[in-house]
Image (spheres, rainbow, N blue to C red):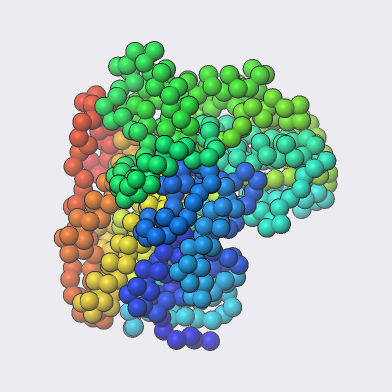
């Protein structure tokens, strides 16, 4: 069944899909959002596990595009819990009357490019096909759980819950013996709450993660007053940072040149403030392994301080990756939870999980009986939701074929050979390294400006050139190579999904730099893009050369270290 032609189909009704809908409406476009869930909110719709909350302060992790919306909403905590974030998503949807253009409980299964009409045919799981000029993949970076399974799992008679698909009615574990597999952010947030609720909790850990205390609570009055005095300045300050949130980065402070007492004071201050501030105390900690170790050792000491049993503290201390190179976690009482009598930590490296049984889990050394098991085993990040749609571009090439060696995009926004298909916070954009809401606003406003510009010139399509895509992908790879980020087996690298190509998937140059680059690309008449209508090319600028200048104020020894790694990368990839 073929529906009427639309201007835009948006896939996903999380924050990015909702804002894209709003921006498209402003231009009078005919637009429809397709959403698999029965409500808006994306991440905050699905991830309802106990303890789920945002890791960026809510004053910053919220839309800034509408001052009235901003002024009318009051966050109750520094780091809003999932339920409040979902209420906020619904508040935004209702305020702008978005739901009438969202088709819920429906999945997009395919999108095929039709060169004859400069548009896409979008197929839904109902079998309906919607022709549309543009498709916007607002599908989120962490929306598809990995396919992790375990031998014998089908024989298990107890209940299995995934943190990423938590029952809407909640789960009562009282009186139950519960096992949880995984110690990523979802587990680290949920373990303290499940431990309080269950009779007994067994945590199966394969790899420990670094976690920093949230020190959550009411928003400090000083913060709120600062925000209230000038919300525009508050937002502008966040957007002008690497991560899209204010983190007191000290670009001139070099840990290896700082006295130990001074380092300890600075790290203690940041630990006391809470959240991600520990990531940006020293300019060298993300580049120089020696500096990174200073911060890692500080966190290890904090773990030992919080966990009474030294053997358990040792097991909880990461040893296989530099601090900050796997997504660090922000917790409320995680480490202290291991002091409870009803909590046990099992090290899967020493005691591997063999199989599920009818009554629980069997490792090489022990058998465990559980009433319920929680899988907090992660996501097929960044590419999973895009690759699960059968997307075919020019000449029928699939996006999976195009990304066989890892995702390649131009600015994280478009893929060569896939005209009029936009990715919001796609691979190659700063996305998961940033405050997602500020990244989303930047991307959506940028995509809206592309569409407006095409319409103004009566163009039919825009496509990233393969040259620009290659140049941008190289720039992303090289930027990551400057840092320690590619040195861990993280989901940033695709390392958590067997067979997934290894590539650092986010742009590590910072949201501020990325925004400047996007603006330069636009200023040069959409550099790196081919704009056309039918057979007629209207403008063509295949080369991308809007690279950022070398970082200012970077200590010479760090620049040398970073550039040495880039040279190695270039030699390994035949680009030298
Ligand atoms: P993560 O951070 O990917 O964590 C998944 C966890 O599950 C991690 O500890 C994994 O250990 C563990 N895991 C995965 N597969 C297995 C198997 N087969 N056996 C044992 N343990 C396993 O996902 P989260 O949902 O916690 O967080 C995702 C992001 O959401 C987070 O980073 C924030 O951005 C928000 P591993 O490390 O692979 O050894």
Q: How many marks?
A: 0
Of 310 and 24, nearer the camera is: 24
Up-down: is 477 above or below 261? Answer: below
Up-down: is 450 above or below 293? Answer: below
Question: Given the current orientation, which residue lies at the most extreme left position?
Answer: 524
Report which quarter residue 343 is drawn in.
top right
Is 520 left, or right, of 281 in this rendering? left
Does residue 458 show up?
Answer: yes
Q: Position of residue 346 (x, y in %)?
A: 69, 30
Is 403 left, or right, of 358 in this rendering? left
Q: Position of residue 413 (x, y in %)?
A: 34, 59
* Residue at left offset 45%, top offset 57%: 72
Is 498 left, or right, of 433 in this rendering? right
Does residue 360 show up?
Answer: no
Up-down: is 494 above or below 409? Answer: above
* Residue at left offset 59%, top offset 35%: 332
* Residue at left offset 35%, top offset 49%: 231
Of 199 and 487, nearer the camera is: 199
* Residue at left offset 24%, top offset 71%: 453
Of 241 and 117, nearer the camera is: 241
Of 82 and 6, nearer the camera is: 82
Q: Quadrant of the C terminus?
A: top left
Q: Position of residue 121 (x, y in %)?
A: 44, 78
Is 70 left, or right, of 12 in this rendering? left
Q: Position of residue 295 (x, y in %)?
A: 43, 23
């Amino acid at each position: 069944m073929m529906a009427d032609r639309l201007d835009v189909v948006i896939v996903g009704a999380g924050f990015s899909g909702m804002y894209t809908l709003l921006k498209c409406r402003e231009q009078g476009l005919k637009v429809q959002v397709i959403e698999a869930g029965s409500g808006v909110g994306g991440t905050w719709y699905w991830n309802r596990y106990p303890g789920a909350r945002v890791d960026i302060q809510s004053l910053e992790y919220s839309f800034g595009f509408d001052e009235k919306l901003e002024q009318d909403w009051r966050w109750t905590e520094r780091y809003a819990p999932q339920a409040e974030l979902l209420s906020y998503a619904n508040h935004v949807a209702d305020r702008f009357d978005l739901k009438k253009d969202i088709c819920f409980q429906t999945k997009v299964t395919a999108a095929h490019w039709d060169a004859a009409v400069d548009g896409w045919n979008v197929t839904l799981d109902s079998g309906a096909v919607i022709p549309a000029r543009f498709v916007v993949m607002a599908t989120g970076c962490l929306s598809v759980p990995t396919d992790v399974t375990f031998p014998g799992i089908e024989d298990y008679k107890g209940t299995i819950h995934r943190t990423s698909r938590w029952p809407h009615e909640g789960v009562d574990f009282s009186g139950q013996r519960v096992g949880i597999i995984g110690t990523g952010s979802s587990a680290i947030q949920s373990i303290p709450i499940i431990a309080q609720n269950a009779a007994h909790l067994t945590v199966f850990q394969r790899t420990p993660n670094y976690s920093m205390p949230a020190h959550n609570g009411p928003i400090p009055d000083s913060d709120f007053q600062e925000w209230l005095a000038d919300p525009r300045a508050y937002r502008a300050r966040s957007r002008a940072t690497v991560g899209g949130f204010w983190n007191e980065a000290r670009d001139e402070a070099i840990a290896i040149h700082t006295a130990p007492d001074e380092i300890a004071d600075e790290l203690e201050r940041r630990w006391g403030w809470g959240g991600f501030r520990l990531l940006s105390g020293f300019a060298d900690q993300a580049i120089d392994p020696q500096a990174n170790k200073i911060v890692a050792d500080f966190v290890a000491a904090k773990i030992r301080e919080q966990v009474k049993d030294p053997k358990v503290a040792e097991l909880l201390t990461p040893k296989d990756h530099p601090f900050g190179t796997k997504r660090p976690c922000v917790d409320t009482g995680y480490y202290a939870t291991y002091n409870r009598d009803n909590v046990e930590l099992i090290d899967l490296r020493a005691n591997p999980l063999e199989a599920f049984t009818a009554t629980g889990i069997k490792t090489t050394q022990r058998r465990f009986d559980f009433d319920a098991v929680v899988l907090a085993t992660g996501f097929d990040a960044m590419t999973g939701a895009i690759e699960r749609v059968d997307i075919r571009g020019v000449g029928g090439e699939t996006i999976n074929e195009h990304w066989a060696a890892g995702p390649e995009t131009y600015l994280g926004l478009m893929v060569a050979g896939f005209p009029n298909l936009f990715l919001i916070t796609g691979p190659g954009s700063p996305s998961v390294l940033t405050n997602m809401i500020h990244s989303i606003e930047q991307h959506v406003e940028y995509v809206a400006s592309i569409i407006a510009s095409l319409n103004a010139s009566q163009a039919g399509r825009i496509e990233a050139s393969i040259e620009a895509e290659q140049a941008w992908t190289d720039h992303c790879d090289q930027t990551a190579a400057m840092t320690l980020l590619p040195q861990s087996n993280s989901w940033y690298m695709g390392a958590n999904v067997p067979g997934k190509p290894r590539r650092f998937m986010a742009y590590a140059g910072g949201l501020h730099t990325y925004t400047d680059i996007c603006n330069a690309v636009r200023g040069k008449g959409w550099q790196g893009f081919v704009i056309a209508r039918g057979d007629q090319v209207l403008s063509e600028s295949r080369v991308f050369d809007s690279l950022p200048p070398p970082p200012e104020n970077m200590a010479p020894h760090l620049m040398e270290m970073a550039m040495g790694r880039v040279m190695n990368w270039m030699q390994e990839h035949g680009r030298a």
